[in-house]
Amino acid sequence: MSGTDSTASAASHASCKCPLYGLGLTSVGFAGQGGNRCALVTDAHAPCIMETQQSKAPDWLTCPRNTPESMAFLARNANSPVFPLAEAEGAREESLSTRFSRMVGSTLN
């Protein structure tokens, strides 16, 4: 899988444990963008650094972008809706908090 050219989605990554993988922040919530975009970078398109720099599967618990600042950002946006791509995850809308709990196994506090 390479850089920003990737067309992978979280659904195609059986081992993906990152609730932000493939998403972008919009004015109405988080939306599926396809590829390997990281939703934490809001001012530009940025690929998952675990994939591109570390050759690892996306995993929030070991991600270099998992910082106190990013956790505060996620907590502020916990109730924001996540709109996955139609072909991903059965296209079910859920809150960021629910997605985080489902994919990471812990809660946003």
Image: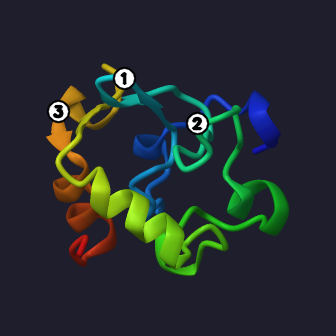
> Residue 101 placed where, x, y %?
21, 67
Q: Residue drawn at (55%, 50%), measured in percent from left and top?
A: 40
Report the amino acid beneath label 3. Glu
- As measured in the structure, the alpha-carbon distance from the residue carrying label 2 to the one carrying label 1 is 24 Å
> Residue 88 placed where, x, y %?
34, 31
Tally the marks: 3
Question: Which image quadrant for residue 72?
Answer: bottom left
Q: Quadrant of the N terminus?
A: top right
> Residue 26 placed where, x, y %?
42, 25
- As measured in the structure, the alpha-carbon distance from the residue carrying label 1 to the one carrying label 3 is 16 Å
Element assignment for label 3: loop
Q: Residue drawn at (22%, 63%), measured in percent from left and top?
A: 102
**Residue beneath label 2, please?**
8
Question: Which image quadrant for residue 25?
Answer: top left
Q: Tag 1 or tag 2, which sits nearer the N-term? A: 2
The answer to whether the residue labelled 1 contacts the one labelled 3, judged by CB atoms less than 8 Å apart, is no
**Residue beneath label 1, please?**
27
| Mark 3 vs mark 2: in front | 3
Mark 2 surroundings: few (<14), some (14-19) or many (≥20) residues within 10 A = some
Element assignment for label 1: loop
| Mark 1 vs mark 3: in front | 1
Report the amino acid beneath label 2. Ala
Q: Residue drawn at (83%, 62%), measured in percent from left and top?
A: 53
Q: Residue drawn at (51%, 39%), measured in percent from left and top?
A: 22
> Residue 78 placed where, x, y %?
23, 54
Dot label at residue 93: 3
